[in-house]
Image: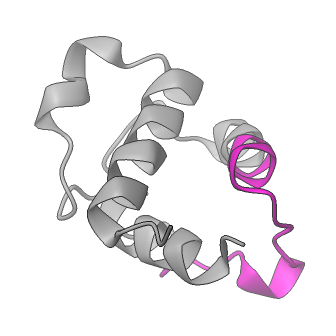
Amino acid sequence: MDVTYAETLDEVREVVVSVLGIEDRAATLDASTPLLDSLPELDSMAVVELVAALEERFGFTLDDGDLTTELFETLGSLAAFVADRRP
């Protein structure tokens, strides 16, 4: 069964919310929600934790070259990347 972008977005949102501990704001996060420089919880250590959680949840490995500011620009950009990479 193919997974839709909307399903991937929901799953990525769950991972972001869990890693950052922002359950109280989960309902406000959508594809256009800015991540870097907008969520104070998303510091450099949280990015490392988030990458590890995404790799584990979706079964792929991010290369160092994949880790760009564009990747973490919005929740939608992160979900689109995951949707392209997930097995």
Estimate the x, y position of residue 32 in percent, counting from the top left: 17, 64
**Quarter the C terminus occupies:** bottom right
Estimate the x, y position of residue 7 in percent, counting from the top left: 35, 55
Q: Does residue 37 appear in the picture of this structure? A: no
Query: 6 or 50, which lies in front?
Result: 6
Name, please, the residue furthest toward the front: 1
Estimate the x, y position of residue 66 in percent, counting from the top left: 73, 82
Q: Residue at x 66, y 48 (%)?
A: 47
Q: Residue at x 30, y 49 (%)?
A: 38
Quarter of the image where one finds residue 49: top right
Q: Residue at x 86, y 78 (%)?
A: 64
- Whether 69 is among the magenta residues is yes
Residue 60 sits above or below residue 19 on the image: below
- Does residue 41 appear left or right of residue 47 in this picture? left
Residue 15 sits above or below residue 4 on the image: above
Estimate the x, y position of residue 27 in percent, counting from the top left: 15, 28
Quarter of the image where one finds residue 14: top left
Residue 21 sits above or below residue 82 on the image: above
Task: Report the magenta residues as a range.
Answer: 51-70
Number of numbered callouts drawn:
0
Q: Residue at x 20, y 42 (%)?
A: 29
- Does residue 6 appear left or right of residue 64 in this picture? left
Q: How is the image coloured?
A: one colour
- Does residue 29 appear left or right of residue 74 in this picture? left
Q: Does residue 26 appear in the picture of this structure? A: yes
- Whether 4 is among the magenta residues is no
Name, please, the residue furthest toward the top: 24
